[in-house]
Image (tube, rainbow, N blue to C red):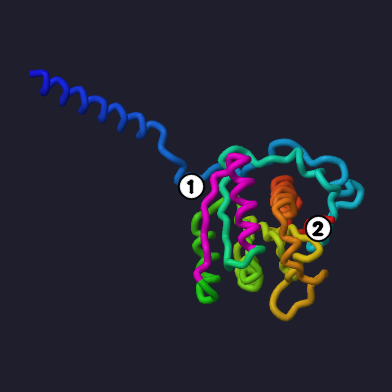
Amino acid sequence: MRTHIRAVAALAALAALATGCGSAPSDDWSRPRPAPSAVGSLGPGFVDPSAPPTPEGTVTPRPGSWDGVHPPRDYRVVLLSAGDDAPTRALVAAVRSWAAAEHVDLRTVTAAGEADLVPAITRALDLHPDLVISAGDALVDPLAVVTANHLAQQFLVVGAELAEPTHNVTAADWSGASYRGEGLGASSNYDAASFTPQRCDAAIRAGAAAVLTGLTGIVVWLA
């Protein structure tokens, strides 16, 4: 009799647990929702209000002027990366740290070699995130081709930039990290040592702040 009672109780507990899980399903990103907006606002010195940046223009924000801007909780971000070099690893670590601190809903797509660069971008697009963050110079040329055909999707390129970005592609880079694609000149000499945790973190935060406040299609240059 006692065995029967324990079995019934166990089944009831399992049923209750299943009901509880079903009442609060995890966000599978399949449901549409309004476009996310920034929490907070940019500080003085991010841009000159009297001279807003032009398309494909460059802004050099005052350090820390982006600190007051945060993504909404569960902001949907795909981290798209390619390469295992030290700068790319530093960028990936910075994105993960930022996502954890800001309660971002982060998913990752990693390109498995040169032949997988465009397919990896497609996999990121198929998730329909609020933002795709790109890390790795190898992605610059493929992104230059793909992004112009997906103008509704926002992209943030960190540690590099597209030579002629469309309005949905924002970049955040600095002296030592300004790769613009194969055969194109850079605005500074490449320096792998410049990809410090502090610099990568600032690039993620400044770039995301620009996207969240509608300053897209520009280069955010960190002094």
Residue found 52% across the figure and 52% down from its top: 107
The residue nearer to you, when weighing 154 against 191, is 191
Judge left or right: residue 98 versus residue 165.
left
Quadrant in which the N terminus is drawn: top left
Three-letter code, disc 1: Trp
Judge left or right: residue 74 versus residue 3.
right
The magenta span reads 88-112
Task: Tell me the SS state at disc 1.
Answer: loop
Three-letter code, disc 2: Trp
Residue found 81% across the figure and 58% down from its top: 221
| Residue of label 2 | 221
Residue at the right extreme of this rendering: 50
Judge left or right: residue 84 versus residue 192.
left
Quadrant in which the C terminus is drawn: bottom right
Please provide percent x and percent y for residue 147. 63, 65
Identify the disc placed on residue 29: 1
Please provide percent x and percent y for residue 127. 50, 55
Residue 23's image quarter?
top left
